[in-house]
Image (cartoon, helix red, strand yellow):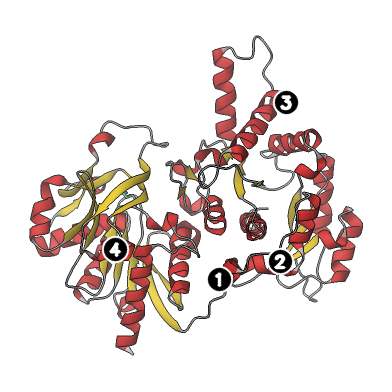
Amino acid sequence: MSGLGKGITTASIGRLLKNRGYEVTAVKIDPYLNIDAGTMNPAQHGEVFVLSDGGEVDLDLGNYERFLNISLKSIHNITTGKVYKNVIEKERRGDFLGATVQIIPHITDEIKHCIHRAAREPVNGNSTADVCMVEVGGTVGDIESMPFLEAIRQMHGELPPEDMLLVHVTLVPMDTMGDFKTKPTQHSVKTLRELGLQPDIIVARSREVIGPQTKKKISAFTDVPAKAVISAKDVPDIYQIPMELEKEGLADVVCSYLALDNREPDPAWYRVVSQEYTNRATVAIVSKYGIEDVYMSIKESLKHAGRALSTEVNIRWLDAETFDQKDLADVDGILIPGGFGQRGIEGKIRAIRYARENKKPFLGLCLGFQLAVIEYARHVVGIPDATSEEMGAGTHVIAILPEQEGVFDLGGTMRLGNCDVALKEGTRISGLYGRTEIVERHRHRYEVNPAFISEIEGAGLVFSGTCGERMEVCELPDHPFFLATQFHPEFKSSPTHPSPPYVGFVDACKKNKSTSE
Ligand code: GLN
């Protein structure tokens, strides 16, 4: 079921194989009719993750990229919407030559085609991965996921036995007496078997470690050998999960099913993610939604930067509409994330002003960048009604991107994905990246209005990164750390490659802490 940690389990199994020198890729199947996550409300579905090719996808692809250090494409997120769209387009073209077009075989064939195509897509340059993880979202037995499970049942019959294995992630709750209950697992496996799918491995999610007795019981009901019933208890840090699964012997089981050599694992990943913290810093995130999943990549990027600086970052979530200025006084830094629409923007502008005037480290992302420009225009440049065209009447220091004018469809039409950004030599941002040419991911419709650039720069805000005519980074030289980016650096951060703007920000927060103590 959703929220159980299927995404992290998928990414972690991939990591176990990657640690053994196998190249791994991953596919997420989302059984909804939306073509992609781009038009979905993040409060319901979590963050919209953006890929290098501009794909707006499920946040689990962010987990795959962070755990596996790979760069995925839109084709790695298969949705019911994409599958049906392809089949209906083929039908209109006449590709089916008079046949009655049906869920089986036409939809299931398309699903299999999409999985095979995504699996073959090279990761990290040229070679095709050795193993492709395919995660089916949703709950076993849902009407929505039936065609996908049927396609997987067919693949199981078509592929040699050592080319495919099925992992079932289940919840093993504890009753009030502290005993594990295996009933939900028994029932979900029964439902799977009715669909013709027998799991090879069960990953049992629970609060505490599941012992041999419970494993034996699950094994007896499901025909999954006890050594392939893997205990995955809750842990405070998701990056520790591969290590937990390693201790459970999961890699042995996976390698033997897939006829892969179980090589000695490279310990580098474990070293990175188990670094001790020696410092602490508190960051306020002033946001519209009080839901952490909406800001998943930001949260993770702060963690990656914190690890690299041995600094545990605590986040104070502040509601942009209701927060009290007092809540900013004792934090070490202020972060304003991306977002859309008017709600909450005045509060975010208030927080940015506080950071600027009180010399608190500040990081602005996308909308946070645009609001930093608006705040500066209002209170330093002297344009009191400065705002963004997105927000309504006023002086539009942030205006619609020229190519966005007249765009009415909302799906997949923003400025999306990778763009080259040139950084000005000698600025804070070029120092953080250690170079002057970078590539980062985007997702927006508005930009700094070119008509105001020289006036704003004349008043002291430095645009230190650009993409042609487009302003991409702003910073203040006479401030401990005041930096904002039109792009989203959080989409490229991982534990082993923390994002430079986040590293700069967390480092400034850490220093802020030591000067205030
Ligand atoms: N709403 C703003 C725009 O479309 C910012 C988008 C964002 O923060 N991702 O330009």
Residue type for callout 2:
Glu
Task: Report the Cα–Cα distance between label 2 and label 1.
Answer: 14 Å
Whether residue 233 is visible here, answered yes or no, is no
Residue appearing at x 37%, y 72% in the figure: 506
Kindly identify which residue carries mark 4. Answer: 348
Which marked residue is nearer to the observer: mark 4 or mark 3?
3
Helix, strand or loop status at disc 3: helix
Which marked residue is nearer to the observer: mark 2 or mark 3?
2
Task: Report the Cα–Cα distance between label 3 and label 1.
Answer: 45 Å
**Is 185 drawn above or below residue 127 in the view shown?**
below
**Crowd rating for badge 3 (residues with CA inside 10 Å; few <14, some 14–19, many 20+):** few
* Mark 4 close to ligand 1, CB under 8 Å: no
Q: Residue furthest top?
A: 98
Helix, strand or loop status at disc 4: helix
Q: Which mark is residue 273?
A: 1
Task: Report the Cα–Cα distance between label 1 and label 4.
Answer: 32 Å
Residue type for callout 1:
Val
